[in-house]
Image (spheres, rainbow, N blue to C red):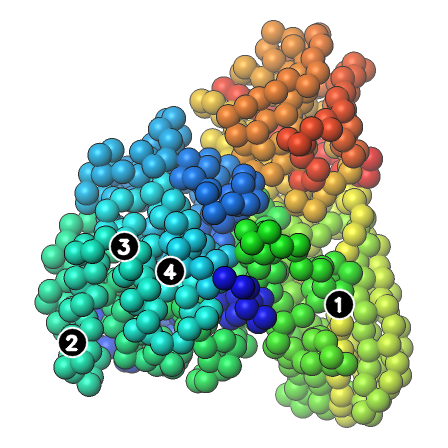
Amino acid sequence: MTIPDDYLERVYAGVLGKLIGVYLGRPFEGWTYQRILSELGPIEGFVHDRLGEPLIVTDDDIAGTFTFPRALEDYSHSEYLTSREIGMSWLNYIVENRSILWWGGNGISTEHTAWLNLKRGLSAPESGSMATNGRTVAEQIGAQIFIDGWALVSPGNPHRAAKLARAAARVSHDGEAVHAAALWAAMESEAFVAKDIDHLIDTGLSLIPAGCLIGRLIADVRNWRAKFADWRDTRERIDENFGYHKFPGNCHVVPNHALMIMAVLYSPDDFHRAQTIVNTSGWDTDCNAGNVGCLLGIMLGLEGLDNGPDWRGPIADRMLISSSDGGNSVNDAVRISYYIANLGRALDGREPLPAPKGGARFHFSLPGSTQGFRIAGHCRPTCSASVEGIERNGEYALSINFRKLDQGKSIAAMTPTFATRDVLRMRTYELMATPLIYPGQLLYADVAAPRANNAVVRVGLMLRRYGDEDRLYDVEGEAVMLDPGMSTRLSWRLPDCGSQPIAEIGVFVESSSDNSQGKVIVDRMGWGGAPACVLKRPDGKGSFWLRAWVNSADNFSPQFNRSFHVSQNRGEGIVMHGTRQWADYKIETELVFHHGRYAGLAVRTQGLRRFYSATITSCGRFELARVRDDCRDILAADKLSFELGEPISMTFKAKGNLISVRANGKSIEADDSTSQAFLSGGFGLLVADGAMSVDAIKVSGS
C-alpha cells in the first residue's frame, strides 16, 4: 500500500488516542461496572483529580506499546521480524521487577511468567506458549494491549500489522490472546485507509482462524448491536455470556475484547462517546480504552479527538516510557510519532522524514502540539497565562499567551526533562528514567514577539533543578529585551547544578510595564554538546539524584561512605545514566572492586545487553568488550595488578569508532568500525556476583 499523505499526522492522532484512553481509564482500572456507576457515574472526562491521582503516570499499556517496536530498529527493519528477536528486545529493555510489565508473579502475571522463561534461556515463542505456561496464563489480555505500535508502522497494510502483532504477542501469549492482538492490529492498520467499522472488523476477522472464540464473540456482539439501541443492553449480554466469571485468570482477553468491539460498533465515528462506553463498562478500563482510542484516533484524525471535551490540553503530549533506556523515558507524543512514522517508512524502503527545524528536540511541528510545555506555577489573580500550539508562517510553533502581566512580574512555560514529583504518588509501575539534559550542554531557543504585543518583554531561558528535600529550584539564564515584532535566538551554557538532576527547562517572560498583553512565540528549543558535570552524592537530603539512574542491580544505594554502591547477588548487575544522544565523551572515576567475578564501567549503553564494557576480573584480567545480546566480543585485553577494596583510577573514553580505557596507568583500546558498533548512548557501572562502588564520576567531552 502507498503510505497516506497524512501518515505522520494520523500516527500522531493514534498515539494521542492511546494516551487519552489509558490516562482516562487508569484511575479506576479493575472496578466493577456497578462501582463505576455508583461512585463516578458515566465517564465523560478525566477523573484522576476526583480520586487524588496524577494524570500522567507510568503504565504498561504505554511503556510496552512504544518500547517493543524498537526491535525493528535493533534488528531487521523488516516485516519478517521474529518472536525470538522481539523476545531479545524484552531482555534488553525490560528492567526486572521495575519497568514496563505488571510483575504479579510467576504463573499469575502472563508477562512476568514469559519474562522468567526468557531469562532462563527459553526463546520466544516457546516463552509464551500454552505448552509452556498453560491455557489460563497464555490467554490473558497482555498481547492485545501492546499491539498498537505494530499497526502504526503498517499503514493500510493489515497483513503486515497482523504478522508483526502475532510475532510480538507470541513472546508472552498464545491462543485467543494472539488472535485478538492480530485482529485489532489489522483493524488499526486498515483504519488509515478506511472509515467503516464493519469493514475494519471484517478485515481483522479475515486474518484470524475461522471459528475461533474471538470470531464467535464478535458475531454475537454484532447481533446484539443490531437488536439493542442502548449499549447497556449489549453490555449485559456480554457479561452474561463472556464475563469474567466465564474465564480463569485475573484479566482474560475475551471479556475485554468484547467490550472494545461493542464500543466501536455503538460509536463508529465519535471518539468521545466511544471512550464513555468503554470506560463506563468496567473491567480492564485503561487497556480497553487505550486500544479503542488508538483505533479511532487513526481513523478520525485530530479533528475526531477534538469533538468533545478538551482531551489534549491536560495531557499536553506528555508520556512516560519506563525502560532500561532511561533517556527515552520522559517523552512526548510528537517525538514518538516521528519515530514510529520513520519505522513505518523504513519498512516500506523509504528514507526517514527530515529532522524538523534542524533536529531541535522541541519543534511543535504537528497541529496543536505543545510537547509537554505548560505554564509553571500559579499566576496572580489579575494575570492569566496559557500555552497553545499555533500555525505561524506555514509552520507550527508554541505560543505563550499572557494578559494583565504587570511590570516586574513574570510567567514561565516549562516542559519536563526528568521525573516529576508525581512519581512519588504513582502506583503499580515504577519509572526508570534518566535526565534528558545536563550541565555543560548548550541550550537554545528561537523566540519572537508579535507586533500586536502592547509592551516590551524580557525573555530568557530557565531551568528547574532538584535540591535539598527534593524541592525544585529555579535558575534563570541570560535574558533579552524583546520589542514587539522582534525575534532572536536565546542560548545558555547550562551551569553546574550541584550533582542534582535538571527537572524542567523552559522560557520565562517578564513584563516591562503594567497590564501588558500579548504573546511570545517559541519556534524551537534544543541543546547539544557533551555534558560537563560531576555526579556524586549532593549536599542535603533527597532521593531524585539517585532516581536519575536506571537501576538493574539487586542493590544500588548511597548508604555507605561512597556515593554509589552497586551489589549483585547472581549474574551481572548494571546501573546506567545518560541518554542515547550522547556520542563522544569520557568518564573518569575511582572504582573500588569489593568482591565478585568482575567489575567495571560501560559506555554507549543502549539497554541492559548493548554497550561497551571495561572490566577488571578478580584474577587481574583487564578487558574491553562489546556486549550485544547474547554475545560478548573481547576487543582488547591485558593484565592489571590491583587489590580488592583499593581504589582503581579509571578513564573510559568513546570518540567516533575509537573506544579506549585507562586503569591505574595501563591503557587498552579498540577501533570498532564494524556494523555491530555502538555510536551513542549513556554510561553505566557494572558488577558480577559481587559489589563495587564509586564516589564521584566526572563526565566531559572526549
Q: Position of residue 10 (x, y in %)?
A: 52, 70
The label number, if any, that marks residue 208 in the structure image: 3
Among the two numbered marks 2 and 4 on one chain, the one whose residue lies closer to the N terminus: 4
Circles 4 and 3: CB atoms closer than 8 Å: no
Q: Quadrant of the C terminus?
A: top right
Kindly identify the amino acid type of the residue bearing the numbered disc 3. Answer: Ile
Q: Position of residue 35 (x, y in %)?
A: 22, 71
Secondary structure beneath dot 1 equals strand
Q: Residues within 10 Å of mark 1 (few under 14, many from 20)?
A: many
From where the camera sits, is residue 212 visible? yes
Circles 3 and 2: CB atoms closer than 8 Å: no
Q: Which residue is mark 2?
A: 224
Secondary structure beneath dot 2 equals helix
Question: Image point 52% across, 30% down: which residue?
Answer: 629
Among the two numbered marks 4 and 3 on one chain, the one whose residue lies closer to the N terminus: 4
* Viewer-side label of 3, 2: 3
